[in-house]
Image (cartoon, helix red, strand yellow):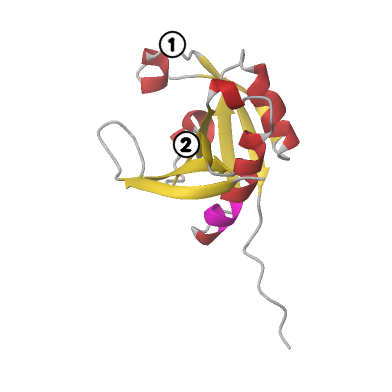
Amino acid sequence: MVVLKFRKATEADPLRGWVPAEHYDIVSGSEVVGTIQLRLGNTEYMRLYGGHIGYGIEPQHRGHGYAGAAIKELTSIARQHGFHEIWITCRPDNIASWRTLEKAGATYEGTVNVPLDSDLYARGDLQMRRYRLTIGPQELPPSG
């Protein structure tokens, strides 16, 4: 349904608490329908507030399951980076993201208050819903 096309990598910014990330375009057919990123640090901040994945679907393409499909595609990339589980967060009022994450197999783990000194809080995100998606180790091909 979708293909992820690598767009760029960004470096960590320790002063801001940002980790390195890989950014991908979400492509359906020949059209870019959105973007998704995999944040490569496994810090407490990523697990609790920022999440390992961030995504956005262009308004005219919403409602077609592209975000969920992109999350599933990104799990193989996350496995290659050594992840066995990924945390994804969203604002409590973002019901579309709740549904997307639940359809992708993520489990709701609770809502947390965002630290006052964070970029999230500065942009108005006072709380985040936390979801865990277990992706397991990379499967090895059968030996024969």
The residue lying furthest to the left in this view is 15
Badge 2 density bin: few <14, some 14–19, many ≥20, Cα 10 Å: many
- Judged from the image, the secondary structure of the residue bearing numbered disc 1 is loop
Determine if the magenta segment contains residue 77.
yes
Q: Residue at label 1? A: 124
Task: Give the x, y percent position of residue 113.
Answer: 52, 17
Badge 1 density bin: few <14, some 14–19, many ≥20, Cα 10 Å: few
Question: Could you tell whether 43 is left or right of 63 in the image?
Answer: left
Which of disc 2 and disc 1 is earlier in sequence? Answer: 2
| Nearer to us in this view, 8 or 40 | 8
Determine if the magenta segment contains residue 95.
no
Q: Amino acid at mark 1?
A: Gly
Please say whether residue 129 is visible from this viewpoint: no
Q: Residue at label 2? A: 46
| Nearer to us in this view, 100 or 49 | 100
The answer to whether 99 is drawn above or below residue 40 in the figure is: above
Q: Amino acid at mark 2?
A: Met
- At x 53% / y 25%, what residue is drawn? 58
Please say whether residue 49 is visible from this viewpoint: yes
- At x 47% / y 19%, what residue is drawn? 114
- Judged from the image, the secondary structure of the residue bearing numbered disc 2 is helix
The region drawn magenta spans: 75-79
- At x 52% / y 59%, what residue is drawn? 82
| Nearer to us in this view, 56 or 64 | 64
